[in-house]
Image: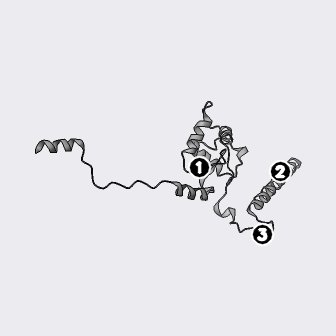
Amino acid sequence: MADSTKGALEFLEQLRKERDELNVLIGGIEKRLGISSAEKPEIQDPSASGPKVKVSIGEVPIGFFHNLSQHAAAEKLLGLNPGQPLATQEMLDAFRKSGMNLNPKNAATILYTALSRNPKFERVAGKAWGLAEWYPERRGEQKKTEAEPEPKRRGRKPSSAKADTAHNDG
């Protein structure tokens, strides 16, 4: 009995430490959102939507990105901490921790290229990546700067073979 009580007390102490860390994180988020500790926004009961597993970027478990492409894995990784962009190397470190196979010679180039070609990602401050949905104002700027599409041509242009036969028939 003493062993089970000791184990329960250790577990309780671990949970208290985690709670203290969570309170610090929650305080930081509230500060960013301009919410004082007294006025809390209404949050839906998390148990209503089913259990969710939280994973921090530093503690990505093995297999977390199993069978995902690099851009899909990056989207999943960025989704862990919404609004917090990550550098290419930080993403690669998380991928490696999860056991994802990466080309050691040019992994950074491959990931950079994959993210830069995907409209779901936004380059932030020239050194990190975020999800484009975090920056809706940037999407509006991009739409304004895009060139007008060329007007479509009407009718069909005859091919050179048809044009040649038309002259020989007459």
Earlier in the chain: of badge 1 and badge 2, it is 2
Front residue of 20 and 141: 141
The amino acid type of the residue labelled 1 equals Phe
Residue that badge 1 annotates: 121
Earlier in the chain: of badge 1 and badge 3, it is 3
Query: Which one is in front in this view, the residue at disc 1 or the one at disc 2?
Result: 1
Residue neighbourhood size for the residue with mark 3, other residues' Cα within 10 Å, grouped as few (<14), some (14–19), many (≥20): few
Separation of residues labelled 1 and 2 (CA atoms)? 37 Å
Residue that badge 2 annotates: 14
Residue 68 appears in the rendering: no
Which residue: 13% across, 41% down?
168
Residue 28: give its label: none
Front residue of 103 and 158: 158
The amino acid type of the residue labelled 2 equals Gln
Query: To which quarter of the image does residue 47 belong?
Result: bottom right
Query: Secondary structure beneath disc 2?
Result: helix
Earlier in the chain: of badge 3 and badge 2, it is 2
Query: To which quarter of the image does residue 87 belong?
Result: top right
Q: Position of residue 37 (x, y in %)?
A: 80, 65
Front residue of 6 and 87: 87
Which residue: 56% across, 42% down?
114
The amino acid type of the residue labelled 3 equals Glu
Which residue: 66% across, 37% down?
96
Query: Secondary structure beneath disc 3?
Result: loop
Residue that badge 3 annotates: 39
Which residue: 61% across, 35% down?
107
Query: Which one is in front in this view, the residue at disc 1 or the one at disc 3?
Result: 1
Separation of residues labelled 3 and 2 (CA atoms)? 29 Å
Q: Does the CB distance between marks 1 and 3 fall below 8 Å? A: no
